[in-house]
Image (tube, coloured by chain):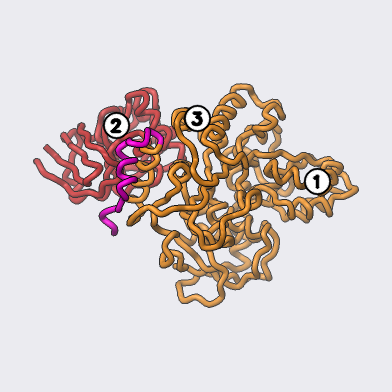
Chain colours: A red, B orange
Amino acid sequence: MRGVFRARGLVNGLEWGEALISSSPISFLGGVNPEDGKIIDKSHELFGSSIHKKVFIFPHSIGSSVGAYVIYKLKKRDKAPSAIINLRSDMITVSGCAIAHIPLVDMVEGLSLIKEGDDLIVNGRDGFVILY
Amino acid sequence: MVIYLYLTNYEERALDGEYGEALEMAYRILLSVGRLTDASHLIEISSAHLSGVSYSTIGEHGREFLEGFSLNAKVTIPTTVNPAGIDPKNPSNFNIHEDYILEQMKIVRSYKKLGVAESFTCTPYEVVHPPPKGGHVSWAESSASIYANSILDLRTNRESALSALASAVTGKTPYSELHIEEFRKPSLSILVDTHELSGSMKFGLLGYFAGKMARGPMALQGIKSPTSSEAKALCAAIGTSGAAGMFLIKDKVDVEGVKFDRGDLEKTYDELNDAEEGDVIVLGCPHLGLNEIHDISDSVEGKKFKKRCLLFCSGRVYEEAKLKGYADKIEGAGADFICNTCAVFTPIISHLEVDVITTNSCKAAHYLKRTQNVKVSLKETHEMLKEVCG
């Protein structure tokens, strides 16, 4: 399937990568290792997966607001996702992506059509996602 | 929903990096937060208050970010900052591990470089004169932003450490939510139906209950106008249990109501209190003001504390209390002041090696239990002072 999905653009930037989908929220502080980009929260459905270079799709962040700095650190260590898509975003993810230069969109129309491993382009300025 | 956030030519250029990396990053934060909160544009603000100072809250990741950000950035409006994890003016007190001190002092150095006022308090309105009523500000620290909206008649959203920092550097904030008059109208009313509510702890219990109920601005019905001490406790507790950013004390409102009766008061108390007696008394969450220190000094003058008592306040307020002679009376009774430090997000508490802490603060009770692995005995100030200072 191919298509262009409208979204709300939150953090500017244009990036691409494979979709990594989580149906549950994530706490970046304690949930993701900023040194290697792996999910380290044992209770999380994606435990052990790496978010590095992925278009990471999850509902929203939970937990400490320090999560924003963890997103920044992931980027500094070159272990960050290439882009993030949220169901409905939040202050932690938005501010983290803003300081880390990671494109972020939310409220994607037809998000359920996107499957794990799909090749995506995310445009955070104009607010759309391309599946190609 | 606003689909387009308007930026001026200057703001566009800043976003493109023409005025340097720090302003670019600050405008990226404001633009993104503005889009999240459906802002139509950015507005100018007259002051900022920053959270994210204690190493116990922002950790090494936050320290690393601030070191980079502060290299080429300066605040452009009057900016105060939250307490640190230890007193930056006396870092070697309390035998805290040197690694912690080093990390904390790096954070403090970054903020100094940015040019903030070294207020180190969660009650900036008691340390610097707040802006005139009706003004727009950008305050992080939930207890302070709720106080700003509800008591000082200022306009602020509940900012994060990063959004308030971006505001301090740019002098602007997204025009959204509580900056807009129509979003400041209460959407829920809490009908207080108890014996007349008085005392910081009881106002805190009301706030803890109300914070869970309300998502946005709320009206509180059936209470007297709180003293500044009660108002601080109320604001701090609302900020602890929920996301609401302001309240009004108003007896006639035409919105959905939730009752807060004696049973709710007791239930909320039981939720936060888990011991009869504590090993140490902790007062000053939020930081004690001069009037509160005055009250304590009156009730302990010439007496002796039977237990350790720690009082948290800003260095500025402590200096005033010293000048007025209040601090000497309290110290004479055997209590200790800890300045510029948060009563909760500090290694000092775990260094005490105690099981139960007595406090009057619902906010402290909530966080101490969760972050310091201690039990809490919740009491009104006069009650605990009567028990342990005779």
Q: Are marks 3 and 2 on the same chain?
A: no
- Same chain for the residues under marks 1 and 2 in the image: no
The residue that disc 2 covers is A81
Q: Is residue B6 magenta?
A: yes
Q: At numbered mark 1, what does the secondary structure look like: helix, strand or loop?
A: helix
Q: Estimate the x, y position of residue A79 in percent, counting from the top left.
A: 32, 25
Instruction: Quickly name the residue at label 1.
Output: B323
Quadrant that contains the N terminus of chain A: top left
- Would residue A113 be found to the left or right of residue A49 on screen? left
Q: Residue at x 44, y 59 (%)?
A: B179
Quadrant placement of the C terminus of chain A:
top left
Q: Could you tell me how many numbered marks the image carries?
A: 3
Q: Is residue B321 above or below residue B267?
A: above
What amino acid type is highlighted by mark number 1?
Leu
Q: Kindly identify which chain the residue marked by label 1 belongs to.
A: B
Dot 3 crowding, Cα within 10 Å, few <14, some 14–19, many 20+: many
Horizontal side, residue A120 vs residue B202: left or right: left
Write the start and end of the magenta stretch as one range.
B1-22
Q: Chain of mark 2?
A: A
Q: Residue at x 55, y 27 (%)?
A: B106
User: What element does badge 3 sit on?
Assistant: helix
Q: Residues within 10 Å of mark 2 (few under 14, many from 20)?
A: many
Residue at 66% in and 47% down: B287
Amino acid carrying label 2: it is Pro
User: Residue, x 67% and y 66% (percent of image)?
Assistant: B197
In which quadrant of the rendered view does residue B69 lie?
A: top left
Asked whether the residues under the numbered discs 3 and 2 touch, taking CB atoms below 8 Å apart as contact, a structural biologist would say no
Discs 1 and 3 lie in a common subunit: yes
The residue at which mark 3 appears reads as B63
